[in-house]
Image (cartoon, grey):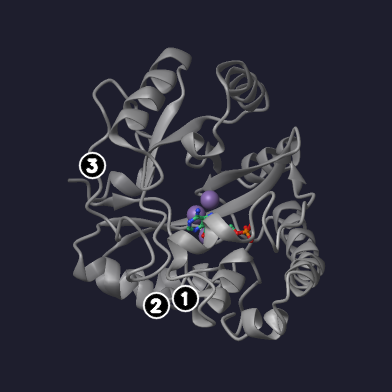
Amino acid sequence: MLDIDLHCHSNVSDGVLTPAQLINRAAQRGVVVLALTDHDDVAGLDEARSAALEKNITFINGVEISVSWRGRTIHILGLNIDPEYQPLFDGLLAIRTGRIQRAQNIAAELEKAGIAGSLEGAYAYVGERGLIGRTHFARFLVEKGYAKDMKSVFKKYLVKGKPGYTSHEWAALSEAIAWIIGSGGRAVIAHPARYNLGKNVLNDLLDEFSALGGSAIEVISASHTPQQMEIFAAHARNRGLLASCGSDFHGPGESFYDLGRLPELPTGCVPVWHDWNAFQNN
Ligand code: AMP
Ligand code: MN
Ligand code: MN
Ligand code: MN
């Protein structure tokens, strides 16, 4: 079991816990290194860092950036970023602004399907400083009884071909990677198995990602089956990409993996943290 978790969410994006609550939970569960990677926002990092200091957790600044690539949505993690780097900060602000319009579009689509009041209903789940996303609509739909839980709601709503879906243009892959690298961070493809890319398209993505300076893929993720972990470990080894691991925790009872206690990286993988200074003091 690994006590390093480099992918999780607070209520600054679509997690349930505040950044400080998240750190407390991580500490209780024996996590020693944690990266907070909220979607398209860095507003939780200061609070999380202070809480982590108290709990003796090594804290890594992170973010999960929403990207459009060949008409698909891909998530790129930035680890060890400088949240004050202006192009990154401005880029994330633009994505969050886009989310506000998109939420209106989602609500309009749900309205067409006879579901009223979803915009207000979704915003009721958004934290004080939080951005809006599909998860907030999903919680509203569960609350109203349209689905029994978070897993099933994304089968019936909010995805392509179902009520509440809208297409949306996120950042370009090149932009997201440039913001991350420019800020001193490392770019990581989040949960690569989730995109269901065919062999050729996956190879194109990995080629392009590497050419743009991306350096790692998430091998261990709650979105991956053990078999997929092995497949992406092989991709990492074959391409000289670093390997990352994260629970993608969103909240108690909502996520497949809780914080920490992830499977070890498969043998032969070079961890994304292999040369991080933070680990020298641990
Ligand atoms: P958004 O960035 O607003 O499109 O929302 C994406 C988020 O929705 C993801 O980060 C997950 O938290 C959640 N999500 C998407 N698909 C699923 C799913 N099948 N099951 C559970 N949560 C999902
Ligand atoms: Mn999420
Ligand atoms: Mn993601
Ligand atoms: Mn995530």
Which element type, helix, strand or loop, lies under badge 1? helix
Residue 16 image-quadrant placement: bottom left
Left or right: residue 130 versus residue 275 is right
Viewer-proximal residue, 223 or 153?
A: 153
The CA distance from mark 1 to mark 2 is 6 Å
Q: Is residue 224 above or below residue 165?
A: above
Q: Are marks 1 and 2 in contact (CB under 8 Å)?
A: yes
Residue 202, image x, y percentages: 58, 23
Which residue carries the number 3 mark? Answer: 263
- Residue 256 falls left or right of residue 106: left
Residue found at x 42% / y 55%: 248
For the point 59% across and 31% down, the residue is 214
> Does residue 101 sit above or below 263 in this rendering?
below
Tell me the kind of residue under disc 2: Ala
Looking at the picture, tell me which residue is in the foreground, 32 or 12. 12
Name which residue lies at 36% across and 78% down. Answer: 21
| Secondary structure at numbered mark 2 | helix
Quarter of the view holding residue 86: bottom right
Residue behind mark 2: 20
Residue, disc 1: 47
